[in-house]
Amino acid sequence: MTLLSNLRRWPQASLQRRLLLFVILPMLLLVGLTIRFGLALTSELVTDSLRTDLELIGRAIRVPISDALLQHDLAAIEAHLESVFTIGRVYGASVYDTDGRLVAATGVTETDLSDSQLASEVVRTGLQQDGYRSVSGRSLYSHFLPVIDRSGQIHGLLQINRKGSDFETSLARMTTLAWLSWLALALLSLLIMWRGHHRAIGEPVRRLVASMRQVAAGDTGHRAEQQGPAELSEVAAGLNQMLDDISQAQQQLLQQQQQQRQMEQQLKKQETMAAIGQVVSGVAHELGAPLSVIDGRAQRLARMQPDAECQRQLDAIRGQVQRLSRMVKQLQAFAHTPVANWQRTPLPTLLQQALTSISFELQPTQPEPRLTGSCPDLLLYLDPDRFELALVNGLRNAIQAADSAVCLSVSLQHDWLHLIIEDDGPGLAEAQSASSVMQPFVSTKPAGQGTGLGLAIVQQIMQEHQGKVELSNRPQGGCRLTLSLPLPPTKETQP
């Protein structure tokens, strides 16, 4: 039972059983039937040969014996019988009268055929008969011919015997040899089937099954060897192609999932920014009018009060109002709708306006930004007010962080325009990253000295112009803010 169960679990055993049941056994059965019918045909041919030989001998001596029998010449009859006996392969010959009594004989014969139904049938019908008979304990093949005179009358019976055991022994030997050959053929076929199946089919199937099990175990990078018969090689190729398709589909699925996560993050960020923008817009609107009123009242009181202390207090109030007004402007800029006033603007004019605008905000201790290097005479297609705001915010941040110098330069590289703002300040701290600093309401300044919207506004405006912002530390100290704009800009960038 253990061997049988092992064979059933063995993957090649099923193929071998089917090959044995549907190919080898039918072939052996067909060969066995062929041998069986061949032996029967051989036996029949041997019998026909015996009959033909004895019939020819009998016809050769029947007429002389008929004449000698009519003349009652026993010596002549015996002489003819002796001549037949000396031919060979004849075991006995005899002549009988029509009543079955023996007239003359030579060799092994029967002495009386008066009770023989076969002899009576030959005399009655005049037709020759033959068959195997037992004479004196021996198996003989007897051929009976009627002795006919020249007038056609039957007046005797001729019997010629051959020893049947000689032919039976030869036929038995032939039968044994045939079935032994069939058995040898069966064993050889089984051996060829087992060995040939193992080399031609079994081994490639084993490797293919092992590859499939390895893949099923989780090794998706494994590929089957394309060896063996063409059909199995095609199966292996199909398996490999399926694994390649699965791997490619998994890669595409991972990419799609990653893109989906990025889009969800961007959408969430946009929704957050939109909500913040609505809140900021409302706050800026509500703060704008009261601040204007406070500044106007403080200015009126300053004209009415000549006292120096009152003037100092009122100037402090107006200073705080102006700081709050600047914060409101920053909030309004952050909540501003996307660019809409697209027009062609020369780059030198744009840079000069930004430097002029920032100059009005400079304190006596702050460095004045300067344009270094040459400025190409480019005609840009953008919203000049919004883009100037981005430059002003970038310059303002650099001025606030610088120790003594702020530089603005222009660079053209691979169809990109780069506006580079550099300062000689302390730079970004190690714990800070450029992406975190450019988030809304994240400020590196002391509490109360910044809104954290400057770089966020710069990044927002550059994204509206299909550009990008990069913030990094300079090797020699300070920060470098790069505003990059694709060239040539097209109207398609307009939202």
Image (tube, grey):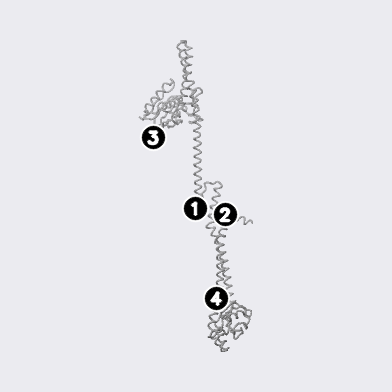
Distance in Å between CA atoms under marks 1 and 3: 51 Å
Q: Residues within 10 Å of mark 1 (few under 14, many from 20)?
A: some
Kindly indicate whether the residue at mark 4 contacts the one at mark 1 (C-beta within 8 angstroms).
no
Q: What residue type is labelled 1?
A: Glu
Q: Residue 48 carries which label?
A: 4
- Nearest the viewer among 101 and 220 is 101
Q: What residue type is labelled 3?
A: Asp
- Nearest the viewer among 147 and 170 is 147
Q: Earlier in the sequence, mark 3 or mark 2?
A: 2
Q: Residue 234 carries which label?
A: 1
- Nearest the viewer among 185 and 480 is 185
Kindly indicate whether the residue at mark 3 contacts the one at mark 4 (C-beta within 8 angstroms).
no
Mark in front: 1 vs 3: 1
Distance in Å between CA atoms under marks 4 and 3: 109 Å
Residue holding disc 2: 11
Distance in Å between CA atoms under marks 4 and 2: 55 Å
Question: Residue 347, image x and y in percent?
Answer: 37, 28
Mark 3 element type = loop
Residue holding disc 3: 415
